[in-house]
């Protein structure tokens, strides 16, 4: 089979990583040919990768091809191309964190723990993707390495979402089948939403963050951007093992107040998807979730605790001459973070377990459903030109993902539709901290039902579950 044709089918949402691995197993596609097709497309892209690792990728893909020929793959995703947000150390490459201040940082001497683990599973490292500088924005704008903008149907550039902007674009454009990101306040879920892909924020400490450049230690976590929930489950099985535990059919709790406050496209397409789920037999209950609203109110009143940690991490840099090399909009936000009372962080750390228990009690086993973002991807040009507009839109973009981060809720962002202008909408499915396995199973059940209902119209958003 033609490798680039397969890559384009992945880009169009007709295939996922598991489907491509099945082609490897059947001998219909070579991991090396497929990697070459992805590399060729990546080399033509702009602003998506900060560093490509073609020699490593081809070496790993060739080894994978030999294993598949021998019927001895290292994992279900052996040979699948994976990209890494440029916060993950990759041996022999510089970890820039998207910042000009780190252009001369020493090359990493070894792989980050997750890079090493997925390499052991036979996955193919393509390189390191672009991001908001220091991962400190939900918009994905980066004037240093170029913003990997997405195009609306009218030809206008939109922000890609951040901070894992390059990761989302790499998957959306079929340059890698899985891209690993980080998420402190929404940095996996937001770009997944804007790019029409699936994004999974894991509970903190589910995945080993050794060798990952931090932003806020109390809130940072990792997660993949993929074409399907099935891909995320396959990846999670590699990293955490397989459990045979079964779960009942998911029940959903939808906060109507949050849905109704979203922009029309997000609201209407979200309700349409939920109606499809209800018609397919999923229990959908509409009610206010007080614990979520309490989290929103606490953040609005006190500030974001992650901002306190971000300022503390970068305080020395901000007071040095090198601060002039930071994106001025990011520098402005970091400096403003220094004015937040540090007691916000200590209060948060003390209160978080109580808030988490209140949330779990209120959900009573149900999965919370909210819009991932209350709007579609905003236009890029006005946000590059105006620092105040950047700050306002960034805050609005992060608003609905921040409570899940505050409460350490694992979350799966799933596409819910496409507007007439070609922009994606998304719903976020979340559970209390630590319930990652149950969340992935619930999201899989949701995707399966949607795939069945949309197969007749060949909707690429739901072909793979």
Image (spheres, rainbow, N blue to C red):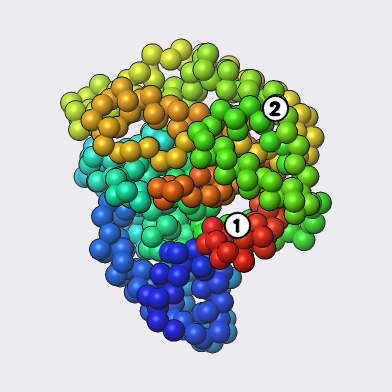
Q: Quadrant of the N terminus?
A: bottom left
Which residue lies at the image location 62% right of the left edge and 61% below the top edge?
Answer: 454
Q: Nearer the viewer, residue 337 or 281?
A: 281
Q: Which residue is mark 1?
A: 229
Pair 1/2: label in front? 2
**Mark 2, secondary structure of its residue:** loop
Which residue lies at the image location 76% right of the left edge and 37% below the top edge?
Answer: 285
- Residue 260: image location, x then y, percent: 60, 30
Question: Decide: marks 1, 2 in contact (CB < 8 A)?
Answer: no
Q: Nearer the viewer, residue 303 or 378?
A: 378
Q: In the figure, 221 relative to 79: above or below? A: above
For residue 226, say whether it is visible: yes
Which residue lies at the image location 43% right of the left edge and 15% below the top edge?
Answer: 340
- Left-right relation of 22 to 397: right
Q: Quadrant of the C terminus?
A: bottom right
In the rendered image, which quarter is residue 141 located in?
Answer: top left
- Residue 252: image location, x then y, percent: 73, 41
Q: Nearer the viewer, residue 313 or 419?
A: 419
Which labelled disc corresponds to residue 278? none
For residue 345, say whether it is visible: no
Q: In the figure, 424 relative to 456: above or below? A: above
**Mark 1, secondary structure of its residue:** helix
- Residue 246: image location, x then y, percent: 80, 56
- Left-right relation of 79 to 412: left
Q: In the figure, 324 relative to 443: above or below? A: above
Which labelled disc corresponds to residue 289? 2
- Residue 277: image location, x then y, percent: 70, 50
Which residue lies at the image location 34% right of the left edge and 43% below the top edge?
Answer: 158
In the rendered image, which quarter is residue 426 located in?
Answer: top right
Crowding at mark 2 (Cα within 10 Å: few <14, some 14-19, many 20+): some
In the rendered image, which quarter is residue 321 located in?
Answer: top left
Label 1, label 2: how far apart the Cα atoms are: 25 Å
């Amino acid at each position: 089979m033609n490798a680039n044709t397969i890559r384009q089918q992945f880009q169009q949402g007709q295939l996922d990583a598991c489907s491509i691995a099945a082609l490897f197993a059947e001998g219909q596609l070579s991991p090396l040919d497929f990697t070459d097709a992805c590399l060729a497309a990546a080399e033509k892209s702009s602003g998506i990768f900060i560093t490509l690792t073609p020699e490593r990728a081809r070496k790993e893909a060739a080894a994978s091809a030999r294993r598949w020929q021998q019927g001895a793959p290292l994992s279900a995703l052996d040979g699948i191309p994976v990209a890494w947000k440029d916060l993950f150390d990759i041996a022999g490459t510089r970890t820039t964190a998207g910042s000009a201040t780190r252009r001369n940082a020493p090359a990493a001497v070894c792989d980050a723990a997750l890079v090493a683990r997925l390499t052991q599973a036979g996955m193919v490292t393509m390189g390191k993707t672009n991001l908001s500088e220091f991962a400190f924005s939900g918009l994905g704008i980066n004037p240093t390495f170029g913003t990997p903008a997405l195009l609306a149907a009218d030809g206008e550039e939109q922000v890609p979402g951040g901070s894992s902007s390059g990761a989302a674009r790499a998957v959306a454009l079929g340059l890698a089948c899985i891209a690993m990101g980080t998420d402190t306040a929404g940095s996996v879920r937001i770009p997944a939403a804007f790019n029409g892909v699936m994004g999974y924020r894991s509970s903190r400490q589910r995945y080993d963050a050794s060798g990952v450049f931090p932003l806020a230690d109390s809130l940072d976590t990792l997660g993949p951007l993929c074409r399907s929930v099935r891909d995320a489950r396959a990846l999670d099985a590699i990293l955490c093992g397989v459990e045979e535990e079964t779960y009942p059919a998911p029940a959903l709790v939808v906060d109507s107040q949050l849905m109704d406050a979203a922009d029309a496209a997000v609201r209407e397409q979200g309700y349409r998807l939920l109606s499809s789920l209800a018609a397919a037999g999923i229990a959908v209950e509409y009610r206010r979730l007080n614990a979520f609203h309490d989290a929103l109110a606490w953040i609005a009143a006190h500030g974001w605790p992650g901002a306190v940690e971000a300022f503390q991490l970068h305080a020395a840099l901000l007071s040095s001459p090198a601060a002039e090399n930071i994106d001025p909009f990011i520098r402005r936000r970091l400096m403003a973070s220094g004015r937040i009372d540090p007691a916000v962080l200590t209060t948060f750390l003390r209160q978080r377990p109580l808030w988490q228990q209140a949330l779990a009690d209120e959900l009573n086993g149900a999965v919370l459903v909210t819009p991932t973002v209350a709007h579609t991807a905003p236009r890029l040009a006005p946000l590059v030109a105006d620092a105040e507009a950047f700050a306002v839109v960034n805050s609005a973009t992060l608003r609905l993902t921040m409570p899940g981060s505050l409460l350490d809720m694992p979350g799966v962002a799933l596409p819910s539709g496409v507007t007439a202008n070609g922009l994606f909408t998304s719903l976020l499915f979340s559970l209390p901290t630590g319930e990652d396995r149950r969340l992935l199973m619930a999201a899989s059940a949701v995707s399966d039902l949607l795939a069945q209902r949309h197969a007749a119209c060949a909707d690429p958003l739901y072909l793979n579950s």
